[in-house]
Amino acid sequence: MVIIMHCYMFTHSFCFLFSLPSYVTHLHSLKVNMLSSAEFVEALDRLGFPDASSLNPSDFDWAFESSSGCHDFFHFICRTLNKSNVITAEEARAFQKLKESGKPILDEAALSKVLKTLAPSDESAENDPALLNSSSSTCGSDDDLSIEELEEELQMLEKEKALKERRCNKLQVFAISGAGDDQQLNAELESAKSKMNAAMASIEVENTDTNTLLEGLTDKLHQLESHLAKEGEQEQVKEGDPVARVPEKRTALLSQLSLDSFLELEKNNRKKLALLLKSPLNPSVSELLETSSTAHSTVDRSAHADEEENRERLVAYKRAEMARIQWSYIMAQYQLIQATAEENGLMAGIKWLSDLSPAKYLSKSPLGGMTEDELVKELQATEVKLEEMLRDEDIPALLRKAASSLSVPVVSADLDIQLAKCKDYSSVQSEVIDYLLRHQASLCMILVALKEELKKWTSYHSDLEKLHNQLVKDREAASLRMESLARLDQDQDLKPSPVITSKDASFSRLLHFLEDGSSHDRPDPLQRFSDLDDAAQALTSDLESNRAAAEVARREQRDVATRLAGRCEKLHQVVYNELQHLFLGPHAHPVATAGKALVLPNAQELTAHLFEVETQLQSLQKQLQEVMGEIRAKRSELERNKHLRQERELYIHFNLNPEKLEKIVQDVESKGMKKKRQK
């Protein structure tokens, strides 16, 4: 059987409305003179202790007669605890598992769930400060209340009644004084409407003026455009050039012109250039120019991939033709040199044979007188001479000289022809280069002009977008203002919501009324420099008073902490002495009678329960200290902030009777509506 004390839950439910030190001193100020062992046994029976009916009260007389320091503990068990503080073994095991898991035992969510399970009297005690003193006795029985406590409670109720009457009177006065404010606000609203109408009229006049100015500017722009178009039509293209130039036309914007005429002129110029290049160039080059011109005209309509492919094919064809021409020229030169050399060799042999003919030889040397051996020797000698003549260097030189004398005129004539062709080609190429340079310059100029116009158009477009967005925002803001002004009268007629929130207009007005004081002393809602100085002085005085109150609270906290520490130490000593006495005393052993079983089978069971109670008391001590810290912090915050105090009082007052607040607000608004209808 485990006993858990719920005093922490009750004190936490009242922590926002009263101070815990007074409650603790009230508990310790109770005098316990009528307690006995019989009441202790009855308390154990009431709490559901097993076999409590078989206990003998005389066995516990020593605990009430030993010392007076343990009376508070027995009073707590006999008078304070009840069946709501007792849990079952399953709940104890669940609680032990919760402690072992490391989770917080009592957080805000768990505490709110526990508070919802309390009786309605506990809930009313939480909301009503007048029932705070009586809530300390809800843990025990109602018969223990004394006459003095009842008288104190009656006085508190009377004070609360008087306070409610004063607040009700003050609210009535504020409601009456609020009617004048409503009239003043209506007058200000009418004046604001008249000012707004005047501003709207002036804005309409300005809009008409700007519209007329814009119309005049558009007319002037049309006139300027027509004038520039006439000047461009009067100019003509210059004639006499081999390649026609692009006519320059002055316009306001180049992007407005079409490029069809320019492209047509370029096409005609390309045809003229092809005709010009046909006469001095060979047919292959002229065909190449024609194909290039036709390819250029088709490339303008085809994709860039076809253009690249045609260009590569053309370059490969040119290279192949040039290599073929060079190879044929080299082979012709080689064959010419070989033919001339053979011809010169034949001519030299014929001449030599003619010089060494047999007739002449026979005339000079008589053959009849020579024998066959001599003729053979003479023939061998002539062969040797021929070999020596062939080894001589004069014959190849003569052959080369003869070949050069035959090839030089042919080569020089061909070179003159090639030089003349090159001169013609260079003249034509210079004209073509001039045309291409002019064409490139015109294209670059058009491209640069179009890029500049594109930049200007993009800047104009961004400016127009910004202007459009700004105008849209202004239009939305103006529409919102017009809707708010149109619905202003309707909003005043709406019925307020009965739910009280921090955003409620009536709730905020009541707070302002309570902060301002009486109707005669209520300041002007318009803040001025003098009002700000007064407010600053009031804030400095409040700060000094708050500092003094904080110092007093700190001293009180130190005193309460010292008192609680002393009392805890005394309680620990008493519990330790009594436990030692229970554990070591001879009368702590079980007493048996003839007709009854043992009252306590083992005295250590009670010792274990008491040790558990001591640990729970220590945990209660820590929790009470935490609650005291929270209460002191909330008290200091309430003392420092006047708005929070007023809000707390309003919440306590109107939470008990929310219909009263609804009725007051409805009365004030009905009076305002009646006065408005009378006007």
Image: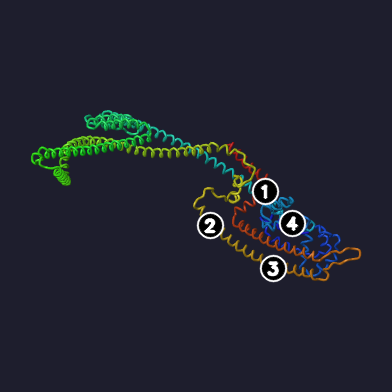
Dot 4 alpha-carbon crowd within 10 angstroms: few under 14, some 14 to 19, many 20 or more = few
Dot 2 alpha-carbon crowd within 10 angstroms: few under 14, some 14 to 19, many 20 or more = few
- Please state, as top left, top right, bottom left or bottom right, where the C terminus lies in the image: top right
Residue most toward the right?
595
Q: What is the x, y in percent for residue 563?
A: 68, 66
Q: What is the x, y in percent for residue 403?
A: 17, 40
Residue holding disc 2:
537
Which circle's residue, 4 or 2, is located before the other in the chain? Answer: 4
Q: Amino acid at mark 3?
A: Gly
Give the side of residue 459 with respect to residue 171, left or right: left
Residue holding disc 4:
93
Establish if 144 lies above or below 488.
Answer: below
Residue holding disc 3:
566
Q: Amino acid at mark 4?
A: Arg
Judging from the image, what secondary structure is the residue with disc 3 in? helix
Judging from the image, what secondary structure is the residue with disc 4 in? helix
Q: What is the x, y in percent for residue 551?
A: 60, 63
Q: Is residue 445 visible?
A: no
Residue holding disc 1:
655
